Image (cartoon, rainbow, N blue to C red):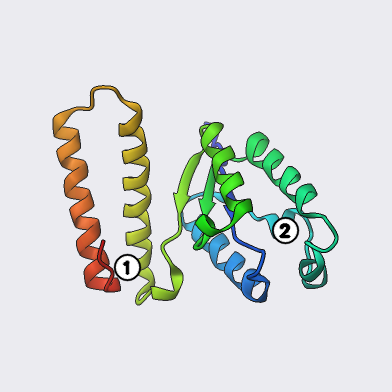
Amino acid sequence: FLIMEKYCYICIPIAEREYDVFERAELAKRQVEKLGYIPVCPLDLNEIGEKELVNHTELQMTAWYMGRDIDIIIRECDAIYCCEGWEYSKGCNVERECAKQYSRDILYQVPYDTRKDVKLYDELNAIKNKLCNTLCDEALQEIPDKDYINAVKRDITEFEKMCKKYFDYTF
């Protein structure tokens, strides 16, 4: 039988965070692989080196990079992985909206600087992605099943407890 490879675009804030973007990208690639996807990183796609990264906004290349990345998301990727801080990045917001409009799976990274244990981090990230996708699916349904909603509520409670216990984070 045929095994389909799934590709996941790494949506990572770059502007104003150039100092650690390569380290964050490597971490994101490993996390995407653990989720069963082949990572597609914009730093690799656009062959951006440290020298180009420092000057990319001055060289007016941002639009070119964004256009190419959106083309890759639409034509080649099954999912997008929104790295920590995506919500503050104009580029990441555009990439996420593109993925949403083209019905790609949207995955979210749990903030990695608050991790205490890699295994727990991975479990928490899996639950967070499951909940986010479930809630998005529910919002699209006109009449959700009551038992299903209760199961989602239990998952949310479990997620909140794990966040409090392992990450000292409260919603």
Q: Which mark is residue 106?
A: none
Q: Residue at x 49, y 50 (%)?
A: 36
- Asked if residue 12 can be seen in this view, the reply is yes
Q: Position of residue 138 (x, y in %)?
A: 30, 33
Task: Give whichever of discs 1 and 2 has the lower sequence position.
Answer: 2
With 142 as the anchor, is 52 left or right in this view? right
Instruction: Give the Cα distance between marks 1 and 2.
Output: 29 Å
Q: Residue at x 83, y 56 (%)?
A: 60
Crowding near the residue tagged with mark 1, few <14, some 14–19, many ≥20 C-alpha atoms within 10 Å: some
Count all numbered tags in the image, as a single digit: 2
Q: Is residue 78 visible?
A: no
The residue lying at 58 percent from left, 57 percent from top is 89
Q: Tell me: residue 78, above or below residue 165.
A: above
Residue under circle 2? 44
| Secondary element at tag 1 | helix
Q: Quadrant of the C terminus?
A: bottom left
Question: Badges 1 and 2: C-beta atoms under 8 Å apart?
Answer: no
- Residue type at mark 1 is Leu
Q: Which mark is residue 120?
A: 1
Residue 161 position in % (x across, y down): 19, 63
Pick out the residue farthest to the top.
142
Identify residue type, mark 2. Asp
The relative height of residue 45 versus residue 147 in the rendered view (above or below) is below
Secondary structure found at label 2: helix
Instruction: Give the percent coordinates (x, y) of residue 119.
Output: 35, 68
| Crowd band around label 2 with a 10 angstrom C-alpha radius: few (<14), some (14–19), many (20+) | few
Residue located at (25% from left, 66% from top): 170
- Residue 56 spot, x, y in % from top left: 79, 62
